[in-house]
Image: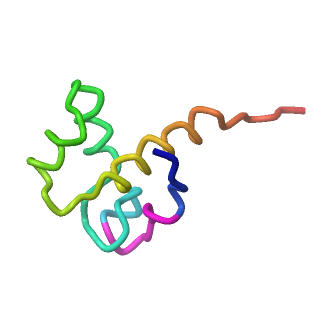
Amino acid sequence: MQVNWRDYIVSTPEVLRGKPRIRETRIPVSLVLGYLAAGKNTQEIKKELPDLTKEQIAACLDYARDLAEFEVVTA
C-alpha cells in the first residue's frame, strides 16, 4: 500500500513533546513501529489500537523509510 506519510504523521511541540505521532491522535509513530518490529501484522496492531487505519500504519513505515534514507553531507 503506497501512502504519503506527510498526510498522516505530524509533530507539534505541544503534543508528546514533539515526538512524531499519528495526526489527530496521541499515538506515537514509535509505538506502531515497535509493534511492527515485534512481528505484529496490521490486523494485530488494529486489535491493540482499534482507531488506527491500515493507511496510518503504512504511513509509519513510509516515515521510517524516509528517515533511513536521510543523508548528512559534510564539507
Task: Return the x and y of residue 12 as percentages of the image width and height.
Answer: 44, 70
Q: Residue at x 32, y 44 (%)?
A: 30
Q: What is the basis of the colouring in this image?
A: rainbow
Task: Return the x and y of residue 46 as percentages of the image width and height.
Answer: 16, 49
Specify the quadrant of the image occupied by residue 53.
bottom left
Q: Residue at x 23, y 24 (%)?
A: 39
Horizontal side of residue 51 vs 53, given as left or right? left
Tell me: residue 2, above or below residue 40. Answer: below
Residue in the foreground of this view, choosing between 29 and 43: 43
Specify the quadrant of the image occupied by residue 55.
bottom left
Residue in the foreground of this view, choosing between 64 and 11: 64
Task: Return the x and y of residue 57 as percentages of the image width and height.
Answer: 33, 49
Residue in the foreground of this view, choosing between 11 and 60: 60
Residue 8: in magenta span: yes
Image quarter where the N terminus lies is top left
Tell me: residue 1, above or below residue 69. Answer: below
Image quarter where the C terminus lies is top right
Horizontal side of residue 67 vs 50, given as left or right? right
**From which residue to which does the magenta span run?**
7-15
Specify the quadrant of the image occupied by residue 36.
top left
Count of number-bearing discs: 0
Task: Return the x and y of residue 52 as percentages of the image width and height.
Answer: 24, 58
Tell me: residue 21, above or below residue 47. Answer: below
Q: Residue at x 25, y 45 (%)?
A: 31
Horizontal side of residue 62 vs 34, given as left or right? right
Secondary structure mostly taken by the magenta-highlighted segment of the chain: loop
Q: Residue at x 43, y 41 (%)?
A: 61
